[in-house]
Structure formats: C-alpha cells, structure tokens
Image (tube, helix red, strand yellow):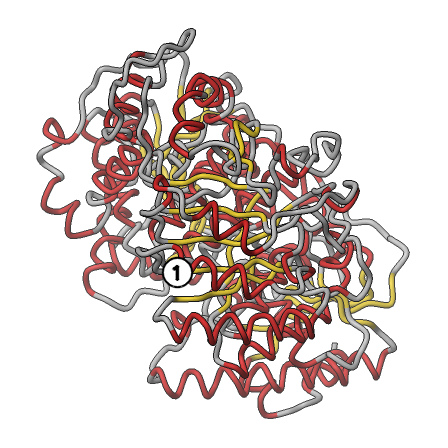
Amino acid sequence: MLNGQKIKRMLSNWINLGLKAKNVPQDMIGLTPDIKVINYQVNDFCNSKCVMCNVWNKPFKQHMNAEEFRRILRDPGLQGVEHIGITGGEPSLIRNLPDYFYGAIIELPKLEGLSLITNSLLPESVISHVREINRKCNDHGIKFSVMLSLDGMGDVHNRNRGIPGSFEKVIKVMNELRHMGIAFSTGTTITRTNVWGLDELLGYLRESGLYGRFRIAEFINRLDNNQNSDMIRSFNNDEIYQLKLFFSKLEYAYESDETIKNTYRSIKNMLSGGARMISCPYLEGTAVNIDCYGGIAYCAPKSQVIGNLQEASFLTIYQRNIGHLHSICQKYCDSCIHDYHAMARPVLMQSIEDTARWKSFFSIQSFNANKNKEKKIYSLNIKKPLQYTIFIVGWYGTETIGDKAILGGIIDRCREKYPDAAYMISSLYPFITERTVNELRINAKVVPVYSENFFQTAAIVDQVVVGGGPLMELEELSLILWAFSIAKKRKAQTTIFGSGIGPLYSKEKTNAVKDILNMADEVFLRDENSVGVAANLTDRVDITNIGDPAIHYLLQHYAPVESKKKNELACFLRELTTEYRSTMSTDEFFVFKQKFEETLAENIQRFCAQYGLVPRFYAMHNFVIGNDDRDFNFQFAKKYFVDREYYVENRLSTIDGIVKAMQTANVNLCMRFHSVVFANTLKTNYIALDYTNGGKILAYLSDVGQLKHMVTMQSIIDDPEQLCHCWVDM
C-alpha cells in the first residue's frame, strides 16, 4: 500500500471513477489531480556541460513553439494552475522566450507567478529576456523571479558546469538583475565536484545579501544522467559528514522558511541512510512535469512520459496511467533526495515535536521547577547494564578539535581505572559526536540529550562524568544538573574531570555551577585559576588541578617530533563573538572587533613579510553551533589578504590534521584555546593570542610557565608589529 492512511489524507481529493489497474490501491483509481504548479522544460538542449546532466549530449529535436504551448495550457485540467517554473535545457537559447511567458499569462486565469532558471552562459540574452518577461509580468500583476545556477566560487562553479568562464557570466547577470530590481535567487546543485566549495559560496551569499537554495544532485530521467554515478549521490564518508555540517548550517544560521528547513532536515536524514521525511507536490497531485514536446510526466526525476497533451486531454492521460504513479511511489519516493518542497511527513513532524518537548526541560529555570518531578518526565523501562558503565556528559555534539582530544584523554584515564567499563556519551547534536567517536576509535554509545534516553541513561549508569570543557554562562548547564541530580538519587558516582570554571556573569548560572560542584563526589579541574574559583564557590578543599585532559591525550598519542618546516604561519583563529565583550556595550564591542581584525591582519602581514612566510588558515571547529572557523577564515582572508598569497583549509579538521599542521609550520599563531594547548604540548614555535581577556588562555599559560608566548587583543590593536616584537622577545 502507498503508506495507507497517510497517503489517503494527503490525496484527499482522489475519487473513485471505477478505472482498473493491476496492483493499484482502490483509492488511487480515478485520481482527479488539482494541478497548481507546472514544471515546464521549454527546450531540451543546453550550452553547458554539467557533470550531473547529459542534456547537452542529446540530439536536437524540434520543441513546441509558443503558440503550441499556449494551446496545451487551454486544457481544462490545467486551468487552476497558479505557478509555472520554466526550465530547460537552457531557456535563454530560445529566441522568443518571452512569448512563452506571455502565453501563460494570457491562457491561465488563476496564474499568480512565473519563474525562470538559467545557467547565465549567454548574459546579454538572459538579461534581454528577463527585462522583457519582467515588463510583461508587471503589466499583468504577475509575480516573476529568476534563479541563477551558481555551484561555487570561481573555478568550482566552472568545473561543476563544465564550461570555463561560467562563474564570471553568472556574476554579470546577477549584478544586472540587482541593478534592474528584479527578484532573483541562486540555485546550487551539489555533486562530488563542489562539496568542498559550499562553505565559501555560502559566505559569499551572506556577505552579498543574497538568497540561495541548495540541492543534492539526483538521478533524473529527463536529464539522462544514470551513467553519471561518479558525481551523483556517490559521496564518501568525509563528504557525507561535510554535507551534514553544511545543511545544518543552512538550517540553523541561514534559511528562515520552515518548509525549506524541513527539506534540509530531510536531506540530512537521507545522507545518514534514512528515508525521505517530506512529501512532494507531485505525490500530492498538485504539480506536474511537462516537457518541450507536450509530454506529461507525473514527476521529473522518475516518471516516464505518460502521454502527450497535443494528442489527448490532461485528465485522460493522468488517470489512465495511475498504475505508473503507484509504481513510482512504491519504488522511488522514499529514496528521492530531490528538493521538491512540501509538507513534512508525520515522522519529521513527530521528531520536531519530540525534540522541542525534551528541549523545554533544558534550562536552569526548568530544571529547578521539575527536578523533583522525575516520574512525570520519563519512564524507567530500561535495564541497568551488567558491566560498569560511565556516562560522559558536557558540551558534546558541538565539540571542537580540542574537545575531541579532551574526550580521548578522559577515556584513556578512565580505562586505567576501569579497564572493562562501557561508555555512553551525551550529545546535543548526535551526528557530530558519532563522528568524534569514530575518529577516536572509541567503542561508545551516543545518547541524544533532547530525548527520554538521556534521563534514563543517567538513572542506570554507575558513574556520571562531566567531561572537560568550561562550566560557564550557558543554559546547557542544566543538562549537567539533570545528569548529576538523577545519578545522586540512585547512589551513582559523580565526577567533574578536566573542566574549567567561567566566565560567569549572572547569579543564576553561578548558582548552577555551585550546585554542580557540590553534587560532585570528585572534582578535577584543568587550571589553578578554576580551582580557586571553585573553592570560593563551595568552600571545598578537595579540588585538584589535573590539567587539561587534552594534554594527556596528546602526550599519549603524539610525541613531539622534529619535522621539516614549511615556510608558513599556521593561523588557528576564531571569530570574536559577543560573549567576550566583557563590559563593553554592543556598539563599543563591534567597533573594537572591527579594529582588532584590521590590526590583526596587519600584524600577520608584517610578520609574514619579515620572516618570509605565507599565512595558512586552519579551523579548530567545523560546526555552525560554536561557529565554523572556516567561515571566519574565508571572510578574514578575502577581506585583508586579497592581493597576497594565502591559503584557507576548507576540508574537515581532525586531531591528526591539526597536529601535523602545527608540527610542520614554521610558526603557529594560536587564538582558539586548544590550539594554544596543542602548540605548547607539542613543543612547537607559537604565539598565543588571548581573546579571553585574562581568562582561560592566561590561566593555562600561567600554569605551564609560558606567558612569554602571549599577546593580548589590545596589544595587537596598539602595535601593528606586536607579533614581530613578541617573536623577537621569545
């Protein structure tokens, strides 16, 4: 069956006309579609040579002219159409393209909007067509928009589209459309060719104030691309993870339309091996595909051409082939990743609702209100493990490279005491931590924080460990409060291992940290400053400084080596975000931030000129939550180093990769906290830039007696040669 009652609800307009088809559900027979959208290919030839498409290889066949197009639009079954999207081939190759748009305006009484997708390879033709189409639409009160295919920056786009110089032509059309005030967006098709250029492209769109949409290339019958399997949906594990990071970035920090967000959520689920989580307008009976010869297809990706509107009526063709629609749904719908935007399937709606419900418990206020109502929150229908089990909680799911090393160090230390223990790790965003577990080669179960399983796990384990990271001004302190509170009630051990304390600003968060410290059976912190703060909060005298667990991990797995040095300054920078504005007002902070970035760039330029180095920018973090350092690196380098040699690493960051980069660089400029820890532990040449205003970087370097390596943000602002002076002084 076609998902039973679900499809019955989605296709409530179906009626039974008594037509019979083999193996077709009775309630599909005689479907009367209510077509609102037409996807129309105005031609079937193209001047591009895209790696995901073979339309350009097809022999030429005569397409319908504008009058023939108007004639098929008069079909009674299409009179309710509200929008037509005109694509190709490449539409701009049609000399009288505006006539097709005008025909739609005249023939469709309920038409509200028209749109065009173009590759922009003929800029003058595109601009001329668009100007005329826009005029006709304005004259008749019809909305008009353009989507420009843009798959990456510069050569990334050119390679995906198969034509040198393509990128510059898109930009030319884009600039002209802006000048004319015509609405447009960009459309990006993702293949193996452009996976690693997506972050840079998105940064460009943001900086330019542009809106774009992103899709995974799919096998589509009309594109004749079944043989392009080396480029389409053939991503390796690193590419899949990168795409999940990227679509998360779109979901959390770019896209505002909830329907489009659901499409991106569905794509992420499919990249993880799951099924499609949204419907599509073709399945709902509200959209249809019409080719340039008048042929109808139930959908563009998988439907055969089921008839021709120049030979029979739309409704007759649609209904007599209903068995083919059923076959498509059975074989392809769950695995189709194409970006047709439609309502969320119940499984996605339920997932969103469940996450929101569990998330509501994770604030300090909610914890305090519900901590004595556990039985109303979760059930204990879960067995206690037979072996000793340790539940590691913290900020996992947003981990940086440093956090990965912390986790590795904690588990190494736990194995010394509990060699046969089992491990569970809570995660705010489980796919991130699953990657970490795989990278560290740890046998551990990842437990989603926003789930009943989090509460259940805290209730059945033998020990809960707060695994590193700072206990600071965050609502997520509530997850530690929950885990410790539940564990203490069941006599499980509670441990803080390798954390820092602060920064803390509010009384609420300070009291939360105090409660966490008081509930801990053992407290091991990462620096003397944190020990002092914790002691003042609790009056405990049993708090120990064990150093950062990442140090232990690095010493266990990476011996300092004498590598052949490259003539590069390896930069491990991060964006200066508002939580570090201290007592500055918002306006004061942004003035300070701008000045800091300008003078930091000047310092780097002068340092590299003085010592004959090339700046190479690395990322200690790749996830949008916590800020993907690659985004800052692209923006910073393009703004200040455009006429100079530089390199931005756009691939995934790993502990191995960062260690190698540090060991082979002539000098390391470290801003991310754990880049300082790594550089010092590995005994490399480094300068530490304290963005924490006397916080954790100062505390760490004080503990290890290496303050000579540190410069402050203010010293960078005050002196364009501060890096040079620091290096000489060392």
Report whether residue 638 is seen: yes
Report whether residue 653 is seen: no
Q: Nearer the viewer, residue 659 or 256?
A: 256
Quarter of the figure with residue 722? bottom right
Which quadrant of the figure contains the C terminus?
bottom right
Looking at the image, which residue sits at the far bottom? 718
Identified by mark 1, the residue type is Gly
Task: Count numbered badges in the picture.
Answer: 1
Q: Nearer the viewer, residue 34 or 153?
A: 34
Q: Nearer the viewer, residue 660 or 725?
A: 660
Asked if 45 appears above or below 310 in the picture, the reply is below
Residue under label 1:
113
Looking at the image, which residue sits at the far top? 22
Asked if 606 appears above or below 89 in the picture, the reply is below
Q: Is residue 27 left or right of residue 329?
A: left
Q: Is residue 529 left or right of residue 560?
A: left
Asked if 382 appears above or below 91 in the picture, the reply is above
Residue 401, position as x, y percentages in the image? 58, 49
Quarter of the figure with residue 686? bottom right
Looking at the image, which residue sits at the far right? 564
Q: Nearer the viewer, residue 483 or 259?
A: 259
Residue 159, position as x, y percentages in the image? 78, 54
Which quadrant of the figure contains the N terminus?
top left
Asked if 500 appears above or below 316 in the picture, the reply is below
- Density class for disc 1 (Cα within 10 Å; few <14, some 14-19, many ≥20) is some
Quarter of the figure with residue 511? bottom left
SS for tag 1? strand
Residue 574, position as x, y percentages in the image? 56, 66
Residue 602, position as x, y percentages in the image? 69, 86
